[in-house]
């Protein structure tokens, strides 16, 4: 099922939560709506679900204008952060619920409902637990039940609102891998809201990065990470450092010194962005040089903070863990990959 959001605006008490948002969601893809709190990602998800109505604009499911249709008419599967399971029902009853409450004309026979629910429990690796109650399961298991319940109605679109937000880091990592495998097997069009960039980069076919009620960039995880189109995206996706620079005849300068990077198309005052791991150490020649202010281990590397220009600017770079850098020692480097954005 394709979903098309056209020029949607949403206001709450005349406060705009979404500004003229348009987004095409492809049939069968898993797309992540990613952004900080207040960016509008959950509002957009609720509009797609039918839990909210747009102030302006339209939402299409396939060729059908669904803007005024109810949640039930849209055939949506929804998974919430806090599971929303019925505590007084067994796991099997929870998964079967959406089918049992259908109108009699579309309700499958009881045997078919049980068969489908048991198949889904097997799919989400919970076979044998169908007689338990939610409070007898772990958080990760409860979230699997919530997904099975959403899938039971055979939804046209599956929506997940920060489904792993209440779980610890190790369980989140396990469920991310599992959710990707489930998606690949079922092929549902899936929209996934998260503020966790690692989660989005690992899970999604495409990212939709949002800020202040607007879409900043849409693209594959690789394209958004490697080619950010705005300072916000560069700073939000992955880690980065920023320096105020100037460009003259293609050469980039920090203050009155060239930094050994040429080929810039911009001119005048700019903001230079680069990632800590995208640097090369140099000895001699034009470069960025700084004094080590602090360092810490990050996995198999050492993350070093450098004061550049007499502590006027601070950046971070990654070094091999066994690099001999010590506090107050000096390091010279150049970014290997970088981006310039106009100074504001």
Image (cartoon, helix red, strand yellow):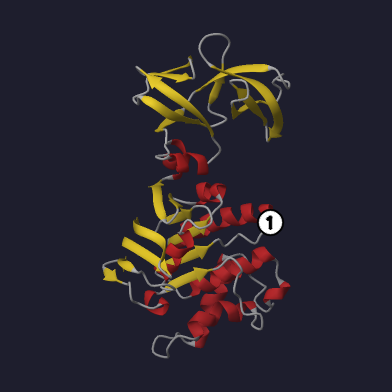
What residue is drawn where x is 59% and y is 29%? 315
In the displayed structure, 334 sits above or below 125; it is: above
| Residue 342 visible, this orientation | yes
Outermost residue toward the left? Answer: 63
Q: Give percent across and percent down for residue 203.
A: 51, 51
What residue is drawn where x is 70% and y is 17%? 329
Q: Secondary structure at mark 1?
A: loop
Callout 1: few (<14), some (14-19), or many (20+) C-alpha neighbours within 10 Å? Answer: few
Q: Give percent across and percent down for residue 57.
A: 30, 65
Question: How many numbered marks, from 0 up?
Answer: 1
Outermost residue toward the bottom? Answer: 104
- Which corner quadrant holds the N terminus? bottom left
In the displayed structure, 283 sits above or below 206; it is: above
**129 lies left or right of 251:** right
Is residue 85 or residue 255 the one in the foreground?
255
Quadrant of the rendered structure where residue 24 is? bottom left
Q: Give percent across and percent down for residue 300.
A: 67, 32
Q: Pointer 1: what residue?
A: 168
Q: Give percent across and percent down for residue 98.
A: 50, 80
Is residue 131 or residue 67 the one in the foreground?
67
Quadrant of the rendered structure where residue 73 is? bottom left
Quadrant of the rendered structure where residue 294 is? top right
- Which corner quadrant holds the C terminus? top left
| Residue 2 visible, this orientation | no
In the displayed structure, 66 sits above or below 336; it is: below
């Amino acid at each position: 099922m394709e979903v098309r959001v056209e020029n949607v605006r949403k206001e709450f008490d005349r406060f705009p939560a979404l500004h003229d948002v348009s987004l095409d969601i492809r049939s069968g893809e898993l797309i992540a709506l990613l952004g900080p709190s207040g960016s509008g990602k959950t509002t957009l998800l609720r509009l797609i679900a039918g839990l909210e109505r747009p102030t302006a604009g339209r939402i299409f499911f396939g060729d059908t204008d669904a803007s005024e249709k109810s949640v039930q008419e849209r055939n949506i599967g929804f998974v919430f952060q806090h599971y929303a399971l019925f505590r007084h029902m067994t796991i099997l009853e929870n998964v079967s619920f959406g089918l049992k409450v259908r109108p009699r004309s579309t309700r499958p026979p009881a045997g078919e409902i049980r068969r489908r629910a048991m198949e889904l429990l097997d799919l989400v690796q919970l076979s044998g637990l169908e007689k338990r109650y939610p409070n007898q399961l772990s958080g990760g298991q409860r979230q699997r039940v919530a997904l099975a319940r959403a899938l039971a109605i055979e939804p046209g679109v599956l929506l997940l609102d920060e489904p792993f937000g209440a779980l610890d880091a190790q369980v989140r990592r396990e469920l991310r891998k599992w959710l990707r495998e489930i998606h690949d097997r079922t092929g549902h069009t899936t929209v996934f809201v998260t503020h966790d960039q690692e989660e989005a980069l690992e899970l999604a076919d495409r990212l939709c990065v949002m800020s202040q009620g607007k879409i900043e960039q849409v693209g594959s995880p690789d394209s958004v990470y490697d080619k950010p189109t705005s300072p916000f995206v560069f700073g939000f996706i992955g880690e980065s450092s920023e320096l105020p620079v100037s460009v003259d005849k293609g050469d980039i300068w920090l203050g009155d010194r060239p930094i050994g990077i040429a080929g810039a198309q911009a001119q005048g005052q700019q903001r230079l962005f680069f990632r800590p791991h995208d640097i090369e150490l140099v000895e001699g020649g034009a470069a960025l040089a700084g004094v080590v202010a602090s360092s810490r281990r990050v996995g198999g590397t050492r993350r070093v903070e450098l004061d550049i220009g007499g502590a006027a600017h601070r950046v971070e770079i990654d070094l091999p863990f066994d690099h001999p850098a010590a506090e107050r020692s000096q390091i010279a480097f150049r970014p290997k990959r970088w981006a310039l954005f106009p100074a504001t």
